[in-house]
Amino acid sequence: MRQHFDQLLVSPKPFVKWAGGKRQLIPVLKENLPDSMGTYFEPFLGGGALLFHILMKRSSQRCRISDLNSDLVLAYTTIRDKASDVIISLKNHSKNYQKNSKSYYYSIRDSNPRSDIEKTSRLIFLNRTCFNGLYRVNKKGKFNVPLGRYSNPNIVNEENILAVSQVLQSRLVSIQCQDFEAVLDYAKKNDLVYFDPPYQPVSETSNFTSYTNKSFTYDDLKRLTQLCLKLDSKGCKVMLSNSNSKEVSDMFTEKQWKLKKITANRSINSNSKKRTGHFELLIKNF
């Protein structure tokens, strides 16, 4: 069953900036995708750059996507189902932000809206106007990033939200809020599972693991490694991105894992001089 996205004005791209987002790595990642796969699974969805690429290039591709961040998953489903309402709400945020950016930003950061539409537009608004577009919450699950320095942030990208909404409406795409291990219940032989977890820090100052208020720990990395082995034994195709760290490479020493070092920029580093010249690992069993 082919989906037709001919009416799209633009190709969909991530509607949020996400630490470790894969948009700039798509040229490398697409070269490493298998020629054929069953269902595509992505259990750490984040900004969804590779998902949107796959949906545009392989329009009959079945996809099961998930994340443990319930605010993020809600944003995906609300954009899918109520894109026009989200756009109206974002336009309202944009208008109020232009009147007094600082006081409006902090009033929205402190707010706790009830409706799905307002929750989603709040997440996008904060992501577009906060410092470095960083999504981070404290131990209580409260968003705690300060206001960024932007003269004219792009708060309402109407064409993109409509494009994202349209591709997510495909009956071939399902979206869940769940822990990454749940993929084991669904993935079958020849399915592709792509893991892009919060990266293991390569230095003490680069620890970006607070996407949810349950940090992704070294034990979680061990859990993920065991899961990759279980998926491999089921005949699944497994691909994993992570930092170029000894901790990660030491966990994938069995013969089925191919480790490739790829160049990556860090668009979210607060020091622009430290955004380039990084390497990360791409690990595959096919």
Image (tube, rainbow, N blue to C red):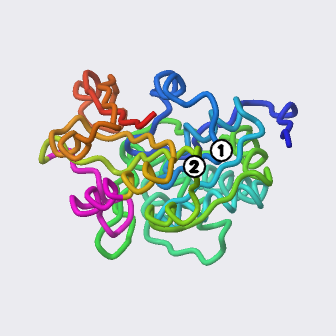
In what element is the residue under mark 2?
loop
In what element is the residue under mark 1?
loop
Q: Is residue 15 left or right of residue 84?
A: left
Where the N terminus falls, by quadrant?
top right
Which residue is more in the foreground, 225 or 26? 225
Question: Picture coordinates of residue 194 (x, y %)?
Answer: 48, 44
Which residue is more in the foreground, 191 or 199? 191
Q: Is residue 243 left or right of residue 97?
A: left
Which residue is more in the foreground, 23 or 156? 23
Circles 1, 2 touching at the beta carbon (< 8 Å): yes
Above or below, comparing residue 142 to residue 184 in the picture: below
Above or below, comparing residue 74 to residue 256 in the picture: below
Label 2 belongs to which residue?
A: 189
Residue 107 visible in the shown view: no
Q: Nearer the viewer, mark 1 or mark 2?
A: 2
Asked which quadrant contains residue 13, the reply is top right
Asked which quadrant contains residue 252, the reply is top left
Question: Picture coordinates of residue 221 (x, y %)?
Answer: 28, 56
Looking at the rendering, the stretch of residues picked out in magenta corresponds to: 205-226
Quote the CA–CA distance across marks 1 and 2: 8 Å
Q: Residues within 10 Å of mark 1 (few under 14, many from 20)?
A: some
Residue 118 among those drawn in magenta = no
Q: Earlier in the sequence, mark 1 or mark 2?
A: 1
Which residue is more in the foreground, 99 or 148? 148
Label 1 belongs to which residue?
A: 38
Above or below, comparing residue 26 to residue 18 in the picture: above
Residue 77 visible in the shown view: yes
Q: Is residue 88 left or right of residue 106?
A: right
Q: Three-letter amino acid code at disc 2?
A: Lys
Q: Residue drawn at (22%, 50%), measured in percent from left and top?
A: 207
Q: Residue drawn at (32%, 22%), measured in percent from left and top?
A: 263
Q: Three-letter amino acid code at disc 1?
A: Gly
